[in-house]
Image (cartoon, coloured by chain):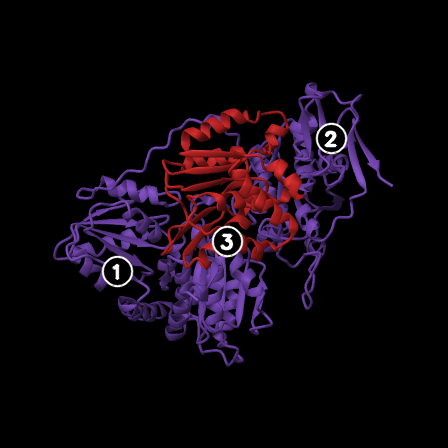
Chain colours: A purple, B red
Amino acid sequence: MNDSERKTMMSGNEAIAQGALESGIGFCASYPGTPSTEITASLFKFTEKYDIYVEWSTNEKVALEAATGASWAGIPALCPMKSLGLNVASDFLLNMNLSGSGKGGLVIVVCDDPRGHSSSNEQDSRFYAKAAQIPLLEPSTYQDAKDATKYAFKISQQFEVPVMVRSTTRLSHSRGLVETGKISKRKKRAGALPQRLYNVPTPHLRHRDLLVKMERIREEFETVDLNINSNPKHTDLLVISSGVSSLYVQDALQFLNSMNVGLLNLVTTYPLPKKSVSGLLEKTNDVLFVEEIDPFLEDEVRMLSGDLKKSPRFHGKRTGLIPSFGEMNTDIVRKALSQLNGTKAELPTPTPSMGRELLVKRPLTFCAGCTHRNFYWAIRKVKKRLNEKLVVAGDIGCYSLGVFYDEAMNTMQAMGSGIGVASGLGQLERFGFDSKVVSVAGDSTFFHACLPGLINARHKNANLTFIVLDNATTAMTGFQTHPGSRYQEQALRRVRIEDLVKAVQPDFYATADANDTKGLIELLHSTIIKDGLKVLLLDSICRLDEDQRDSTLTDVHFKIDADLCRGEKCRICFADFGCPAINWSSTSNQAIIMDAICVGCGACVDVCPHDAIKEERLS
Amino acid sequence: MAGVGGQGNLVCGRVLAEAAIQQGLRPVVGDTFGASRRGGSVLTHLRIGTRDWAPLIPQGEVDILLGLEPMEALRAAVEYAGKRTIALVSLTEVPTANVNSGERVYPPLTKVSASLAEHCKQVYMLDAESALLRAGSPRALNSFLLGSLSALTENPLSQDLIRKALYTTLGRDTINVTAFEEGVAALHQ
C-alpha cells in the first residue's frame, strides 16, 4: 500500500470540519451561505457518532452568540459563515473579543468569495480579525485546512480568544488529499461560566489585556510549522503569499528559469510574526505579495519596513502589479513575475480569441415551475398598470434573480435590507415620492433579518407592501431547515411566519397561492394601491426541494394548441414569461412544451393571452 | 471537464481522482459550485501530480479536455487550451434557454469543431448519442467519455485503474460497463 492510500479526498470545507472533529468540538452553530455551507453540513452527519450539537441558526450573529455561549461553558465550538455573515455577526464579535471566549475554544471560519461567484459583493473579511484584534489563520491546502483548524482551537483554548480561520471559494470548493487523524469520543462536560463576561466599566483595560495576549500569540506564530519558508542562499526576490494563492505561486514558479526566488507561505497572517518576516526582508532586493482579495498581508508587511536596516522594493496590489479585485490565479502570478527585474518568467501562451463569437451564454434563470417567476411576472403586470410608478426593494435568495427578470426587482443589497429600505421609502410621500413601495423577502431571510425592519415599518406607519415568498426552505444554499420550514427535524418546533406577521398587526394581511398567476396580479394590484402597512404571504414552491420529496403532479400534462398559438407574432410564453420548459420550435413555427422539463404546474396557462395552453389529464 | 449542470462533471472528476490515488499520485479537483450549477456551464479542473497543484489550470496548460457538450468544450478551450491539449468531445448539443426561446442560435457544429481544432493540438469529436443508445441510457455519458479517455495513449492513468475507479464510484452495472467499453472503441474508430 502506498502512502497516499491512507489519505482521503476532501474539500477545503470538509477538511475544516474534520479538523474541528479531531479537536473534539461539541458544538457548531451556523447560518448557510456559499461557499461555507458544507462545513456545517458535514458536521450534521456526525452528530450522533461523536456526540456533537449542530444547528442552523436564524442568522450568523445568533450563531456566533450561541457558539460563544458553548465555549464559555467549556465546550469547544465552531462557527462557520460566509463573508457577508461576518458583517452580521461583527457587532457581537467586537464585544466578545474583549471579554474572551472562555476555556472551551471558539473558532470562527469565514469563507470569502473573491469574484462574487455566489455573493452580492466582493469582500475581504480579514479586516475583521484586525478590527477585533483576534488571531487569523489562512490555510493554503486541504491538509492545511484541517491542520490550521486544529491549531486554531489550540490557540483559542490556550489564550481564551476567538480565532478566525479564513478560506476562499477555491479552497473551500476544491478537493485534495488529507491525512485524517483520530477523533476523540470522550464525553464533553459543560462547566460554570468564567467571571465578568462583560467589558464595562473599563472596556479600555479589556482592550489593553487583549493587546498583551496578541503579542504573546505573535510570539507563538514566529515558530509555528504551518508557515512554509523555502529560501535559497541568495534571494533576489521573495514571494510572500497566503491562503490558496500560495498554490498559484508554486505553480507559477514552475515556469521560472531563475532559481533565486524565495518563498514565504504564511498561514498565520495576523498578528504577523514580525521577527521571522523581517529577517527574510533584509535578505532580499524585491518582494512580491500574492493574496486574495485586498492587500491585507501586503500592508502588514509594508508597515515593518520602517524598522528594517535595509528595506527591499515592494510589489503587489499597492503598486498595481497585481489587480486589487477578483480571484487570484497562476496566470496573474506568472505575469507579475515576468514584469519584475531579474526573473525570466515565461509568459502565458496568449490564447487566440477566435471562437468566442460562437459562444452563447447559459444565463441563470428561475427553474421550470419556480413560483418566484410567477410573482415577478405579476409584479411586471402591476407595474405597467401603475405606469411604472412602483419600486421593488429586494433581498437575498433565489428570488434575487428578479433583478435579471426585466429588472422586476430594483434594489438588492444585504439580508433583510429590502424591508429596511422600503420602510424609508414608505415615508417619502411628504417629499413628493410618488411610486408605490414594495419589499420582497424569502422565508429564511424573513427570520434572518426582516423582523426589525418590519416592526420599524409598523411603528412608523410606513406606507408599503411587504411580500414574503414562502417556499418553506432555504432553497439557494441547498434546503437547510429554518424556523418556518414545512418539514422540521425531531425536537425542532416550527415557528410560523403568519403568526409573527399577525403579531405585528399590519393594516392589511392576506395569503395567496403563488402558482395562480392570474389571481396574483389582481391581489398584488389591489393590495399595493391600498394605503398603510400591508403584508402578503405567498405560498410558494421550490421545485428542486419538491423533487427531493417526490412530485405529485406527474399525471398532468400541458400542450400548446397549434390552432390558437400565434407563434412568432406573440412570443409571450417562451420569451417574456421565460419558463425553461417552453421552447420555440423553428420547424413548426410555434411554442412547444418540453415534457421532460415541465413540472406540470400550469402557471403558464393564464400567461397565454390566446388561451392556447391546455391541460391534459392522463388517466 | 466541461459540461452543463447535471451532466456528470462531478462524477468524472471523482472517478479520475480515485484512479490517480490508486496510481500513487495526488489529485486536486476544482469544481464550479453554487448558483452556477442550475443548468449553467460547469467546469471541473483536475490536476494530477506528486504534490498538490493549484485548483485552477493556467492558460494553455490543459493536457486533456473532456467535453461533455460541444459548446461548453469550446468555452473551456478558448480560456485554457494550448499546444498540448487533446480534446475528447461529445457531439450531442445541450441547447441554452435563450436558444430554446429563439433569441439566440446554437452555433453550427462544424464551426464549433473547426474552432476547437484551432485551439487544441488534436480533437476527437465523438458520437456519444448512438453509443449511449446501445448502452441503454443517455445518462452514462460520463462513463463513455472516461472510456475514450482511458484509451488515449497520452493519458497518464492506467486504463484498468480508471475502469476500477468507475465501478467503485458508479457501480458495475451493465449500462456503465457497456458505455465505458463503447467509449474505448469510439476513440479508435
Question: Disc 2: which chain?
Answer: A
Question: Disc 3: which chain?
Answer: B
Left of A82 or right of it: where is A280? Answer: left
The N terminus of chain A is located in which quarter?
Answer: bottom left
Question: Disc 1: which chain?
Answer: A
> Element at badge 3?
helix
The foreground one among B177 and A565 is B177
Left of A366 or right of it: where is A138? Answer: left
Q: Position of residue A452 (x, y in %)?
A: 58, 54
C-alpha gap between disc 1 and disc 2: 64 Å
**Residue at x 49% of width, y 78% of height:** A193
Which amino acid, by three-letter code, is at mark 2? Val
Q: Which residue is farthest top?
A: A569
**Residue at x 66% of width, y 38% of height:** A373
Mark seen at residue A607: 2
Mark seen at residue B160: 3
**Residue at x 17% of width, y 55% of height:** A306
Q: Which residue is mark 1?
A: A229
